[in-house]
Image (cartoon, rainbow, N blue to C red):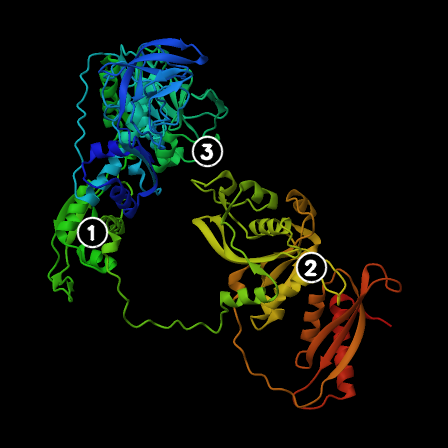
Amino acid sequence: MKFSENWLREHVTVQASREELAARLTAIGLEVEEITALGEGLAGVIVAQIVDCARHPEADRLQVCTVDTGSGTVQIVCGAPNARPGLKAPLATVGAELPGGLTIKPAKLRGVESFGMLCSAKELGVDADASGLMELPADAPVGAAFADFLGLPDASIEIKLTPNRADCFGVRGIAYDVAAVLGANVTPLDVPAAAVESADALTLELNAGAAAPRYCGRVIEGVDAAAPTPLWMAERLRRSGIRPISLLVDVTQYVMLELGQPMHAFDRATLKGPVGVRAARAGETLKLLDEREVTLDEGFLVITDADRAVALAGVMGGWDTRVTTDSRSVFLESAHFAPEAIIGRARKLGMHTDASHRFERGVDPELPRLALERATQLILAHAGGSAGPVTEASLPEHLALPKAVRLRRARLARVLGVHIADAEVERILRALGMQVEAFDGAADEPVDALRGLHIGGGWWVTPPSRRFDIAIEEDLIEEVVRIHGYEAIPTSTPTGAIPLAMPSETRLGEGELRRALAGRGYRETICFAFVEQALLDRWGQAEGAIALANPLSAELAVMRTGLLPGLVQALAHNRDRQDARPRLFELGRVFCQGESGPIETLRVAAAACGRAEAEQWGLPARALDFFDVKADLESLLALSGNPARAEFRPTTAGFMHPGRAADVWLEGRCIGWIGHLHPALAKALDLDEEVVAFELELSPVLVRELPRAQPVSRFPSVRRDIAVLVAEQHPWSALHDCLQNALEGRVQGIQLFDVYQGKGVEPGFRSLAIGLILQDVSRTLTDQDADQAIADAVAALSRTFGATLRG
């Protein structure tokens, strides 16, 4: 929000300097980003009028001008293209020092004497226009000090507003905060209802429900649309970052900056009526004021004339109904639109307007009629005309009414840690425009033991309609402390016993997982929790995605449903910047729309590509593969104390490579995936090498078994090796579990040490070489015991999988 300092001081009279004003604004949450001083050091610059112009005898582009200063005439040599007889412009007299350090002295230009300098706006530091002399209105008093005539010195102040302070998108809203913090009063705004001198009115219709609950309009006949915008208004617009266009348009812009209510003016002759608000129809087109023709859908609101779309509600007016200098009758609109009906609509069309910026954050629902009267007042004063009656259509059931919020004295003292006098609390709240009614506390309510103060009771506070951000007690506490001053709250050390949090032995800490992955060469990353919709579509993870109501950009429009899309993007980003072996992991939340609302799930994911090992002479170069990342995953699962409890089954995830990926199952349910990315996905993501990744739900991974002491056998173990032929569709994990069950109590270890397919092995089968380590805690096993164990193992494999011993 950018505004003129003098304009603000017109609404609230304070003696604070510019520097103090900026410091106080920042301290109360209206952060001042930039201050541009205007018109400093213009002593000696006056309003002058060119009486006559003659060509310079020695230069084609120069003119010798006779200039009236109000106390005589002087000769000025000027090269501005717009210098002409009758023009009024600022004149820097001899001795004047302009911004930038230029001192005006008598001079000879190509042999002709010049006694001063006619100036452009840029040379005076009041605007960026350097195309010619700054043209002043015809009624500018010749000889008057230029700074006084233009209301200088002044400053353009730009503040950074947080989304909850939509009330400060108008100078008057800022004035209430300034008045509160500096102990002043806001100047009353005198806007009497305009006398109704015309019967012309348009019927209004509301057909958008809660999206557009109020619409006000008024016809003004007989206006002079070609009348010039008064200089004071044009200058305030310029100092607020808005270029003046024409009187009717400038008035609507001025009211928006002053009160915070966006408005629009239609040429009455282009409207038939009734004027209404409805949802746009799919495929409906509209030519806007910037001459772009846009195609709309049902998510947009349009202003209609006899059902014909004539403006994009809350964003921009239409081309066909715009006011021009030929307009003789104007229809002013002032409406209230719900923020959710406007949020993102302008951005969807690649636009951003002052109106949409305000409506997206919320506008005072009680402001439209006042804004309409203020605009009428300005138009009648400077363009003439006859005002018709104000017509209004509203849906009261969809208009939020201010509700009283309780502020307890004890709660205020407890949150702030300091007692603020009742009179100061009430002064602050009333200065902010709130209605305050005190109530007494019960006899048994708390007393401040340190100060002997009764701190029961409090106030019922009703915020003004513009402060719809005030909803709960904490909002009022924030208002009190920010105006009272955070620097006035003493710093104190908290006291009292701090309970120790005892970690559970049955649950791993997230830090342990982080350290384990970091120890295996991964680096932790934190990705955005919101991603592009198209990215989730590529991954096939768009189902249940939650769209943001007000995204930062189209690339960050939905909440992520998985960690891998963002993590793989980060991996590719690092790879493109010459990281030869990027390895990244993330612990974070994913979001999905459930039946009763959004569901958040904590997950862990890792992704890697490049070489399996860092380049060295001792090992041959080898690309990272499935089993490298599987080992990293198993190292995490091993932290639980039972690494064998996880199963790896053929994947069902469409973004994983079939045959080179697996679903991870734990305790009878799938908790994630591991493997190579699908080639089609890798191509769509423009990945130039294979990426291996995994993603798991975190909560089952964090479950840890309580450690139990086991006796160490005093008797030697026996190892027997067997080789079996088994159909290749049977996974090793299934064979491992079969052997474990068949030899329960006798086997201490099962090791797969060779897999063979080729000559001598029938197609569709494979040879598995298995080492069985047998041991008993009470005796030494005999050869007969070992032979029996092998027989039992082979029988179980044969019975379950049709396996046979390989000769």
Q: Nearer the viewer, residue 501 or 210?
A: 501
- Three-letter code, disc 3: Arg
Q: Nearer the observer, disc 2 or disc 3?
A: 3
Q: Which mark is residue 347?
A: 3
Describe residue 404's horizontal placement relative to residue 264 as left or right: left
Mark closest to the chain's N terminus, 2 or 1: 1
* Above-or-below relation of 296 to 721: above
Q: Where is residue 492 in the image (x, y as percent from the top left)?
A: 26, 64
Quarter holding residue 212? top left
Identified at 43% across, 31% down, the residue is 352
Q: Which of 384 and 447 is in front in this view?
A: 384
Describe residue 521's horizontal placement relative to residue 16 as left or right: right
User: Element type at marker 3?
Assistant: helix
Q: Name the residue under label 2.
A: 626
Mark closest to the chain's N terminus, 2 or 3: 3
Which corner quadrant holds the N terminus?
top left
Which corner quadrant holds the C terminus?
bottom right
Distance between the Cα atoms at labels 3 and 1?
39 Å
Q: Name the residue under label 1.
A: 407
User: Element type at marker 2?
Assistant: helix
- Three-letter code, disc 2: Phe
